[in-house]
Image: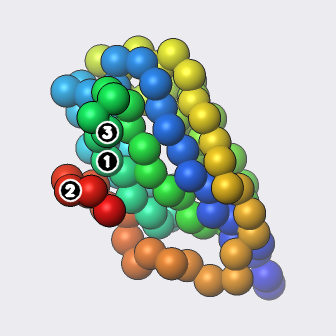
Amino acid sequence: MSTSLKTVDFEVFGRVQKVFFRKCTQEHGKQLGLRGWCRNTPEGTVIGTIQGPSDKVAEMTAWLRDIGSPASRIDKLELKNEKSISDYTYSDFDIVRKKI
């Protein structure tokens, strides 16, 4: 059984810092079996990369666009560099606290 893997970079705009957004993103990503990372930016957004089966990546991007953490307010989600991959680049879903 072959499941197609996808990777996509994301940036979430709105009130997404200091509202446990990164922690909730990490937890939701892990629940879906995804890998990747997320971090705050100096501009007040949260950026990251998601990797996993394409249906789970779609589920995660919908969560990032429409739900987020309980105290967050999502104004916009931008997705970039979406493509199929043959293997994972990341081994887990991490919160990055320094620049990559």
Residue 94: x percent and y percent?
31, 61
Q: Between label 1 and label 3, give the one nearer the viewer.
A: 3
Q: Quadrant of residue 77?
A: top right
Contact? badges 2 and 1 (CB < 8 Å): yes
For this view, does 79 lie left or right of residue 34? right
51 shown above or below 46:
below
Task: Give percent across and percent down for residue 81.
Answer: 67, 55
Separation (CA) of disc 2 from disc 1: 8 Å
Picture disc at residue 39: 1
> Which picture quadrant has residue 18?
top left
Q: Amino acid at mark 1?
A: Arg
Q: Which residue is mark 3?
A: 41
Q: Are marks 2 and 3 in contact (CB under 8 Å)?
A: no
Picture quarter with the C terminus: bottom left
Residue at 79% over, 82% down: 2
Whole-percent x, y for residue 80 in the image: 65, 48
Q: Which residue is mark 2?
A: 98
Quick one: SS at disc 2?
A: loop
What residue lies at 29% left-to-right and 40% top-to-bottom?
A: 40
Image marks 1 and 3: residues in contact by CB distance under 8 Å: yes
Question: Can I make out residue 24 in this image?
Answer: no
Q: How is the image coloured?
A: rainbow
Taking 86 as reference, is 24 left or right?
left
Q: Residues within 10 Å of mark 2 (few under 14, many from 20)?
A: few
Residue type marked 3:
Thr
39 over 14 or under it: above or below: below
